[in-house]
């Protein structure tokens, strides 16, 4: 659960990521696939990408990525994606549409596979374990989402699947975005 309003990291020269208190998160204007969550755990949903590898802009659900490996969220909840398989082009997800801007001011963080929330919890993309891990400040590690099996299923964190998740970033509402490289998708984990 995300608590408090804190700046957790800079993503570019003038862009910052904020975490705001509350349950859930994300930008409701951003399309996500229908989810079957029971409300007792984190919920995973696809934000963009149809699962086909390629370089197609357009409606988020029809867009194609080729090995997206890092994500960053700006103050307007736009998702910037470093698309490794497409010559590291930066792709932009904004208002339900994916585009490829000629220039992007975002400098992607390194390592991209770690994000920290306002409570000091670290979230780690376990690329080869196909899971997202949570490490508390006390050193306790738990599985936040993913079964460990490769797949692209949305839903409750315990049944959702990933394929080589690599990049993590929080949005202003506290949702965790994941570059799901093996699936060519951008996924969103709403913390409950």
Image (spheres, rainbow, N blue to C red):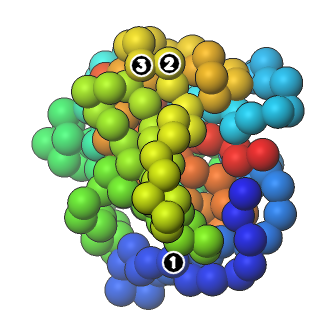
Quadrant of the image for the N terminus? bottom right
Mark 1 lies on residue = 8
Relative vertical location of residue 26 with respect to residue 188 in this rendering, above or below = below
Say which residue label 3 marks.
148
Residue 132 place in picture, x, y as percent: 46, 38
User: 10 Å neighbourhood of mark 2: few (<14), some, or many (≥20)?
Assistant: some
Estimate how packed mark 3 is, as few (under 14), some (14 to 19) or many (20 or more) residues with alpha carbons within 10 Å. Answer: many
Residue at (24, 49) in percent of width and height: 89
Who's the residue at 57% across and 51% down the image? 176
Q: Nearer the viewer, residue 184 or 104?
A: 184
Task: Identify the residue at image location x=55%, y=32%.
Answer: 145
SS for callout 1: strand
Residue 103, picture quadrant: bottom left
Q: Is residue 187 visible?
A: no
- For this view, does 29 lie left or right of residue 128? right
Mark with earlier residue (3, 1): 1
**Side (left or right) of 67 relative to 5:** left
Query: CB of mark 3 within 8 Å of CB of mark 2?
Result: yes
Whether the residues at callouts 2 and 1 have beta carbons within 8 Å, the answer is: no
User: Could you give the CA–CA distance between mark 3 and mark 1, rounded to whole angstroms?
Assistant: 28 Å
Q: Which residue bears the numbered disc 2?
A: 147
Q: Nearer the viewer, residue 139 or 61?
A: 139
């Amino acid at each position: 659960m995300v608590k408090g309003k804190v700046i957790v990291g800079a993503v570019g020269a003038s862009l910052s990521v904020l975490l705001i208190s509350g349950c859930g998160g994300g930008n409701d204007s951003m399309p996500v696939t229908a989810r079957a969550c029971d409300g007792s755990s984190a919920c995973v949903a696809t934000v963009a990408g149809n699962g086909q590898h390629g370089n197609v802009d357009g409606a988020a659900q029809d867009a194609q990525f080729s090995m997206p490996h890092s994500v960053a969220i700006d103050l307007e909840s736009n998702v910037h994606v470093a698309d490794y398989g497409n010559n590291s082009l930066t792709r932009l997800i904004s208002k339900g549409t994916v585009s490829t801007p000629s220039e992007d001011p975002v400098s992607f963080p390194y390592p991209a596979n770690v994000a920290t929330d306002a409570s000091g919890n670290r979230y780690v993309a376990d690329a080869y374990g196909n899971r997202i891990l949570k490490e508390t400040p006390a050193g306790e590690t738990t599985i936040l989402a993913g079964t460990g099996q490769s797949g692209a299923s949305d839903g409750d964190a315990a049944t959702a699947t990933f394929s080589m998740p690599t990049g993590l970033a929080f949005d202003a509402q506290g949702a965790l975005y994941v570059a799901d490289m093996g699936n060519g998708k951008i996924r969103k984990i709403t913390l409950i």
